[in-house]
Structure formats: structure tokens, C-alpha cells
Amino acid sequence: MKREEAIALIKDMVVSCEDLGVLGIMLMLSSAVVARSQGYQVHIKTEGDEHTFVCIARVAKKHNLAVCIKREEDLIVIYQPLPERPYDS
């Protein structure tokens, strides 16, 4: 996603989700080698509560973004997935 889109997503999360258990938010550029996404990713370190996971995932879905929740790390990664590519024959 573009930087401006990431900022709009974060603003929407703040407005839509009350009492977010967020410890930190980072914008990270996707690594071309291992990325399943394009542009920026939003990495959110949380306090691990279910309300935060559900609310953030709902807002990301509204923006047509993919969400990867790593519960063991209390981390949420939001990204714009790469378009599906048909297999070459």
C-alpha cells in the first residue's frame, strides 16, 4: 500500500476502535525477496487482547487489506497483497 493509504488506515483505526491496546505502530517497506505484498506494511504491536485483534482486522478489511495476526508475538501485520498471477503453462 502507499504511505498515504497506510496513514489513512491508522487514522481510521483510531476513530473506529475505542480503547485500542496498541503499544506501537511501524510502517515497514516490503522486502522484494520475501514479500507477499507491495509497498508499505503496517506492523502493530499490541497488548494481545481479542478486542484489539478483532477491531483492527475489521478496519483493515474495510480498506481491502490483508491481515496476518501473530498471536504469540502480539503482532498484527496489515498489507496490500500482491495480485494473483495465473500459472504459466
Image (spheres, rainbow, N blue to C red):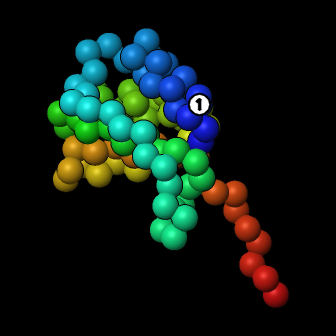
Q: Is residue 72 visible?
A: yes
Q: Secondary structure at mark 1?
A: helix
Most distant residue in the right direction? 89
Question: Quick one: quadrant of the C terminus?
Answer: bottom right
Type of amino acid at the residue the image marks with label 1: Glu
Is residue 34 toward the left or the right of residue 51 in the image?
right
What residue is rendered at 60% in x and 52% in y?
Answer: 38
Q: Within 10 Å of the Cα at label 1, are there few (<14), some (14-19), or many (20+) other Cα atoms?
A: few
The picture places residue 37, in percent across and down from the top left corner, at: 56, 55
The picture places residue 60, in percent across and down from the top left corner, at: 50, 34
State whether residue 58 is above or below residue 19: below
Count of marks overlaid on the render: 1
State whether residue 10 is above or below residue 26: above
Q: Which residue is mark 1?
A: 5
State whether residue 40 is above or below residue 7: below
Q: Nearer the viewer, residue 16 or 50?
A: 16
Is residue 87 toward the left or the right of residue 28 in the image?
right
Quadrant location of residue 52?
Answer: top left
The picture places residue 56, in percent across and down from the top left corner, at: 40, 30
Q: Is residue 67 visible?
A: no
What residue is rendered at 17% in x and 33% in y?
Answer: 47
What residue is rendered at 52% in x and 44% in y?
Answer: 40
Question: Quick one: quadrant of the N terminus?
Answer: top right
What residue is rendered at 61% in x and 38% in y?
Answer: 2
The picture places residue 20, in percent across and down from the top left corner, at: 28, 21
